[in-house]
């Protein structure tokens, strides 16, 4: 069977599923981290339609200066959802200092912490998730995951960061499909739905960081190949190497039988 996708039907089914999940779990409010990109924008719009804009809380979480913060504000304004801005830059800086990454007083201990740009970049999404969890619990709400299938397939996500949520709204949709759904929602600014995706951390686009095109990942997932075997293999290897981010932690069970 060939791949088909109906954006309007997908949109409406997701709205139904949000309502079904809310009814089953007994909640009426949701918290969403708003980045100003397509994923969080589409997620917020779907939740506003499903639960009412008054029940959607958008949290903007810049790490110091965020050049596109106005995009995040515009999403909240266009949707009419409640919002707060929390700058995590001070918290991030404090963590660098107490771990001895910079500052006059290195951390005490028996070993030095090697400088790691990758570890430092991933601090921001983890701090954001901690902050979002705080608001979620304080409001008696649920935390909406906004990551999409293309990102999770190749591991373009942070474990215990943006992978942590109470339900994953776009986790079954590719990046291409998220855009298609967003374009069916006139309350969203078109330029934000079609905005070049970036992590807001490295100063590069997602595709520059990945070395892959989202269109190729979409075709790999939906058609079985992007048309280039070499690129297919790169995606397959990333998918295999990052599967641990998509699964619950392994539980070591000393009571299970040991195979001979």
Image (spheres, rainbow, N blue to C red):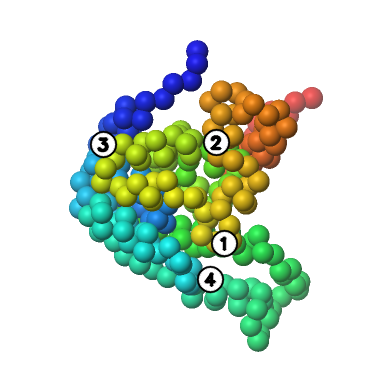
Q: Which of marks 2 and 3 is nearer the N terminus?
A: 3
Judge left or right: residue 163 versus residue 194.
Answer: right
Q: Report how far apart the C-alphas of labels 1 and 3 lie in the structure.
A: 37 Å
Q: What residue did someone put label 2 on?
A: 215
Q: Report how far apart the C-alphas of labels 2 and 1 lie in the structure.
A: 21 Å
* Residue that appears at 36% across and 52% down: 32
Q: Report how far apart the C-alphas of labels 4 and 1 lie in the structure.
A: 17 Å
At numbered mark 2, what does the secondary structure look like: helix, strand or loop? helix
Residue 256 in view, yes or no: yes
User: Picture coordinates of residue 201 (x, y %)?
Assistant: 55, 61
User: Picture coordinates of residue 10 (x, y %)?
Assistant: 35, 29
Q: What residue did someone put label 3 on?
A: 19
At numbered mark 4, what does the secondary structure look like: helix, strand or loop? helix
The extreme front residue here reads 191
Pointer 4 with pointer 3, Cβ within 8 A: no
User: Badge 4: few (under 14), some or many (20 or more) residues near its Cα, within 10 Å?
Assistant: some
Query: Any mark on residue 203, and which?
Result: 1
User: Badge 1: few (under 14), some or many (20 or more) residues near its Cα, within 10 Å?
Assistant: few
Q: Report how far apart the C-alphas of labels 4 and 3 lie in the structure.
A: 36 Å
Relative vertical location of residue 134 with respect to residue 173 in this rendering, above or below: below
Quadrant of the rendered structure where residue 152 is? top right
């Amino acid at each position: 069977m060939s791949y088909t996708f109906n954006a309007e039907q997908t949109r409406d089914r997701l709205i139904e599923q949000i309502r079904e999940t809310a009814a089953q779990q007994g909640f009426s409010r949701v918290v969403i981290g708003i980045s100003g990109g397509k994923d969080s924008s589409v997620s917020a719009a779907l939740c506003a339609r499903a639960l009412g804009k008054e029940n959607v809380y958008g949290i903007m979480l810049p790490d110091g200066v965020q050049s596109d913060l106005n995009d995040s504000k515009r999403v909240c304004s266009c949707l009419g959802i409640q919002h707060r801005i929390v700058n995590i830059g001070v918290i991030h800086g404090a963590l660098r200092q107490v771990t001895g990454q910079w500052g006059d007083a290195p951390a005490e201990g028996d070993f030095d912490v090697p400088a790691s740009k990758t570890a430092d970049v991933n601090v921001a999404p983890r701090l954001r998730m901690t902050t979002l969890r705080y608001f979620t619990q304080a409001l008696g709400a649920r935390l909406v995951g906004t990551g999409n299938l293309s990102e999770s397939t190749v591991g373009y996500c942070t474990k215990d960061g943006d992978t942590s949520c109470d339900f994953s709204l776009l986790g079954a949709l590719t990046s291409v499909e998220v855009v298609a759904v967003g374009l069916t929602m006139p309350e969203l600014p078109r330029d934000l739905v079609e905005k070049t995706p970036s992590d807001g951390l490295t100063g590069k686009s997602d595709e520059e960081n990945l070395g892959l095109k989202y269109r190729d990942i979409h075709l790999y997932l939906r058609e079985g190949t992007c048309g280039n075997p070499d690129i297919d293999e790169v995606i397959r290897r990333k998918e295999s190497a990052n599967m641990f981010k998509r699964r619950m932690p392994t539980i070591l069970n000393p009571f299970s039988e040991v195979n001979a």
